[in-house]
Amino acid sequence: EEKKALTRLALLGLGWGIGLDRFYEGRTKDGILSIIGWGIIFTSIMYFSPCSGYDYAEGVKKYSEFSPNPLIIIPFGLGIYGATLIIRKAFRLLRSFESAE
């Protein structure tokens, strides 16, 4: 039981972005949805972020005219929610490791 909890915790810690812990648990559909979800979050953060190439470098000089895209809040919120779920699952696995005999 301890080994199982440690293995799941290691997979969660190392492969949370690609759902390794979910694939290990046999939940393939959840693993694929995890990959898609985190991919959408990271891609939209990069898309909506204000720092993109030459325009960003020139825009730094005119910081008073800078206006970030307000839609950046959505992927950040979803990312914070996902990180909260990961931390909650990590604590649950740590508790199961503690109680295992």
Image (tube, helix red, strand yellow):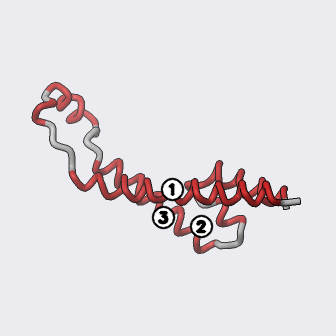
* Residue 74: % across, % down: 32, 58
Q: Residue furthest right?
A: 101
**Figure quadrant of residue 52:** top left
Which residue appears farthest toward the top when viewing the image? Answer: 61
Tell me the distance, in whole angstroms, between the alpha carbons under discs 1 and 3. 18 Å
Q: What is the spatial separation of the Cα atoms under label 1 and label 2, in whole angstroms?
A: 17 Å
- Horizontal arrangement in the rendering, residue 49 relative to residue 62 (left or right): right
* Residue 84 image label: 1
- Label 1 sits on what residue type? Thr
Rendering coords of residue 38 (x, y %):
47, 58
Q: Secondary structure at mark 1?
A: helix
Question: Dividing the image into 4 quarters, which one contains the N terminus?
Answer: bottom right
From the image, tell me which residue sits under label 3: 36
| x, y percent for residue 70 | 21, 52
Mark 1 near mark 3, Cβ–Cβ under 8 Å?
Answer: no
Residue 31: give its label. Answer: 2
